[in-house]
Image: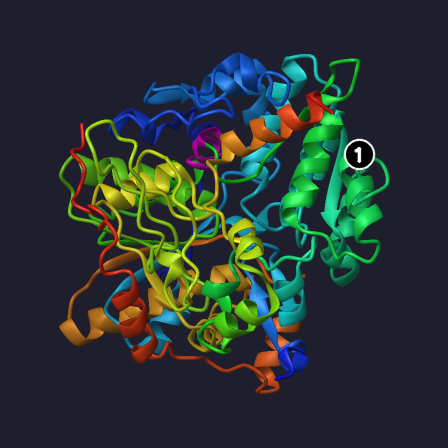
Amino acid sequence: MNDHRYDDEIIYCRRLGHDLTFAYCRQGSRGLPCAAILGCWRERLPVSEILTRQFSPEELEQAFHPPQDKLTSILDIVRQVQTG
Amino acid sequence: MSPKQTKVLLSEDEMPRRWYNLAADLPPLNPPLGPDGNPVTPDQLAPVFPMNLIEQEVSQERWIDIPEKVLELLYRWRPTPLHRAHALEAALGTPARIYYKNESVSPPGSHKPNTAVAQAYYNKEFGIKRLTTETGAGQWGSALSFACSLLGLECKVYMVRISFDQKPFRKLMMQTWGANCVASPSPETQAGRDILAQFPDTPGSLGIAISEAIEAAVTDSSGQTRYSLGSVLNHVMLHQTIIGLETKQQLKKVGEKKVDVVIGCAGGGSNFAGLSFPFVNDKIHGDQIEIIPVEPASCPTMTRAAYVYDHGDTAKMTPLLPMHSLGHDFIPPPLHAGGLRYHGMAPLVSQAITAGLLSPRSIHQLECFEAAMLFAKTEGIIPAPETSHAIAATIQEARRAAEEGKEKVIIFNFSGHGLMDLTGYDRYIQGALSDYEYPEADIARAMERIKDLPKPRLEAAAVR
């Protein structure tokens, strides 16, 4: 099955504040799906099946790891910067 | 015959002199945990935020004075008008009296400068010369650029690459106000360089842009750069409460003694919190008000509990119902976190939902655009896409009032205009948008998969 056939489908992204294609949500910026992809697309596309075919369980675990509290995530970035 | 009053105005000297802090009236939040697993301390946040804002972030004071200098800056566009939506009411044939607080009159066109100006002021007071931030479509980036220009601070905005390319006009707004706006990932930070080395054609993400903005602040050896965030955090909600505090004075001015419904769209929660928190205070003290945060049905968090954590044991270390696992086979790992959280939503808004003070609602995009079009044709202003959610909920409530024959008072936050976001209207007008219903069978299958996981406790928390 060609999982790229939905890549041009468009959705309004509530995080970025403008329209995006499914290709962006599926592949994201680091080669992993956006953590919100299931909530945003599952009504329209078989997104779970697409992801399961494309990504390993480890990759999915990384992509969908529950979000940290905002301050915690900020401090995590600070720690990464300070430790190089 | 005297003309119908359409705008309720306040003079500058009638503007509220204090912000309202809802944290004082809710059960204490569990402190966020740092990377070491211990509660975050103010000192840990010092490389990122000035101490005066950190103090506000953790404050339990109910009222916090607005500095005179901040008031003077806010006078550029505040107090904002409260409009009576006579034309919309007539079009709906409702007995309800609909009011909207027009935050689109700020120079950047949204509510965002309310906190941008305050944050820029506190940073300057602390001796900071330069602020960094991230932005998507540019609403927050343009607001902070504007604020920095008023206070003579440098502003560096890391704009997600895909937004940078798709939304050139907001980028130009930032540049006009003197900010340095670069596409993220950029070659200017280690985080950006690492990503570009691995993914040269990456369209970027908010996560990367945040990393770059924080890195730029933390690595400035002069110590004169800090990071600024436009949503989610407590001090952001605090600064926005001027919206609701002004609204209450304006309602009093026109003799409205009771508010029945308060509505705001809720992304990160700041515009919703700004209007609603002062009314939440009234509700806590006994007023009967329905307070509705509205979100898109296409990507719900509050109404479908994207991530829910629960204190499952007395040590408060058990998470957990990762509801986002609905509809697929992968269940995210648990996270040890206290309290109920909604993905991307301000903790104070999440906590108010848990306490039973709010009634979240989700609405499909076609209904939102239909509402926005009706609003534009009756009241004249073209709403931002987010704002259209609040308008759609308002119309639902106004129609309900008509069915019930009740003269309800409905207030909503007109959080921003949509003049920079007309492509969505184009797609709606061209008939290129449609709604999608979530298949009930999928819900049933997903619920079966997670039936043995711990269930969230959603009972209302005790309110002080």
Using the rendered image of the protein, determine whether residue B294 is visible from the camera's viewpoint. no
Q: Position of residue B415 (x, y in %)?
A: 50, 52
x and y percentages locating residue B460 in the rendered image: 17, 42
Q: Quadrant of residue B178?
A: top right
Q: How is the image coloured?
A: rainbow
At 31% from the left and 56% from the top, the residue drawn is: B360
Q: Which residue is mark 1?
A: B190
Compared with B17, B431 (above or below) is below
Q: Is residue B1 above or below residue B202?
A: below
Compared across the picture, whether B120 is left or right of B78 comes to: right
Which residue occupies the foreground of this view, B330 or B279?
Answer: B330
Per the picture, the main secondary structure of the magenta-coloured stretch is: helix
In the picture, which quadrant includes the N terminus of chain A? Answer: bottom right
Q: B129 left or right of B332?
A: right
Nearer to me, B455 or B247: B455
Which amino acid, by three-letter code, is at mark 1? Gln
Magenta stretch contains residue B340: no
Q: What residue range appears in magenta?
A: B234-241
Q: Secondary structure at mark 1?
A: helix
